[in-house]
Image (cartoon, rainbow, N blue to C red):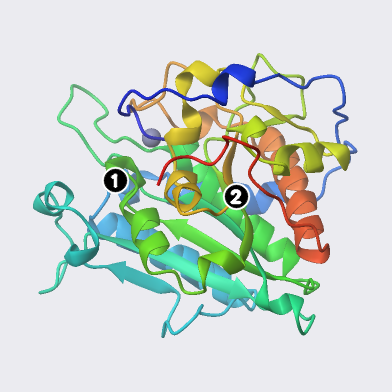
Amino acid sequence: MLASLTPFRSAAAGALVVLFGAVAALPAQSSGSERYLRAHVEFLAGDALAGRRSGSRDEWIAAEYAASQLRQWGIEPAGAAAGLVVPVMPSQADEAARSGADGPGAFRPVTWNAVGVLPGRHGRRAGEFVLVSAHIDHLGTRDVDGDGIFNGADDNASGAAAVLEVARRLSAARPDRSVLFVLFGGEERGGLGSRAFAEAPPVPLERIVAALNVEMIGRPDPTLPAGTVWLTGFERSTLGAALAARRLPFVADPRPHEQFFFRSDNLHLARRGVVAHTVSTFGLHADYHTPDDELDRIDFAHMEQVVDILTEAVGWLARSAFVPAWNEGGRPQP
Ligand SMILES: [Zn+2]
């Protein structure tokens, strides 16, 4: 999750309504995801990856890890890509971001995206895509007294783990539509990976019918009922209401003044027209962007609940013919 953003005014934000009434939690029995989620977060947020700083070799290793996980579940390279890890070169990023990059090799990528597709099985609808994403980078290390590693367990090893687990669970039965799984790099430096993806997508953006980005789901939001998740910009499109109508416990972002819709990787896609929102349960905990965002503060039972909700939502979108649309005034400016 980005720490700050340029001030803006939103016509749609004023109309936001928090929808608590219609939600219903999914069944409480374990879906078996918890151990997979723990395995991913332990690796990604472990000290060995030194905080996965955007553009660093550690971020690159995190992307390769995600790609190798996706491979074992039959997720394939997307579009014309030769592999699942796609380097983002300097011509795809701005000067400011470029100057701080320390990637390996003569071409010095500024970041890496891990991108894969689960091909749909329905002839015509296999050409339509549902996108599930999360950023995999974080802040690296800082020269501070004591622990200087920003592990980013919640931000955003939790979201990356969720995407990998949704991929594993959906791969068991190919849905009608194709599903794109993307782990973005460079989010903490302004969404470098997602911007490059949106500028040179592996499939035409108009074929991506919906995008759910996952950010900071490692702890429950104390202001929400247990077993619910919030969707940034809920009122901006028909997607949130459609999921809620399926009795999936998606509610509006309870803190619209934080402008989270504009603070994650959904934004670059939304600006180009893709109905793209971020799913989160971030409750503004004090460990945000500090070295205390650690593994031992992750609530894995909660994460499993979120992944159950996400799997249901993505699975339904990938099986259905539903095409969400922006509500009037909801699409952000390009
Ligand atoms: Zn962040």
Residue highlighted by disc 2: 275
The residue that appears at 74% across and 62% down in the rendered structure is 169
Distance CA(mark 2)–CA(mark 1): 34 Å
Query: Would residue 207 be found to the left or right of residue 311 on screen?
Result: left
Quarter of image, res 85:
bottom left
The residue that appears at 70% across and 19% down in the rendered structure is 17
Quarter of image, res 208:
bottom right
Q: In the figure, 141 relative to 34: above or below? A: above
Query: Would residue 86 be found to the left or right of residue 116 on screen?
Result: left
Q: Position of residue 106 (x, y in %)?
A: 10, 74
Looking at the picture, which amino acid does disc 1 mark? Answer: Ala
Query: Would residue 39 be found to the left or right of residue 59 on screen?
Result: right
Which residue is nearer to you in this view: 170 or 123? 123
Q: Position of residue 163 (x, y in %)?
A: 59, 54
Looking at the picture, which amino acid does disc 2 mark? Answer: Val
Among numbered discs 2 and 1, the one appearing first in the sequence: 1
Is residue 194 visible in this depiction of the protein? Answer: yes
Q: Position of residue 187 (x, y in %)?
A: 36, 46
Which residue is nearer to you in this view: 72 or 280? 280
Residue highlighted by disc 1: 50
Q: Position of residue 207 (x, y in %)?
A: 60, 68
What secondary structure is marked by label 1? loop
Is residue 283 visible in this depiction of the protein? Answer: no
What secondary structure is marked by label 2? loop
Assign ligand 1 to one image quadrant: top left
Q: How many marks?
A: 2
The residue that appears at 55% across and 68% down in the rendered structure is 69
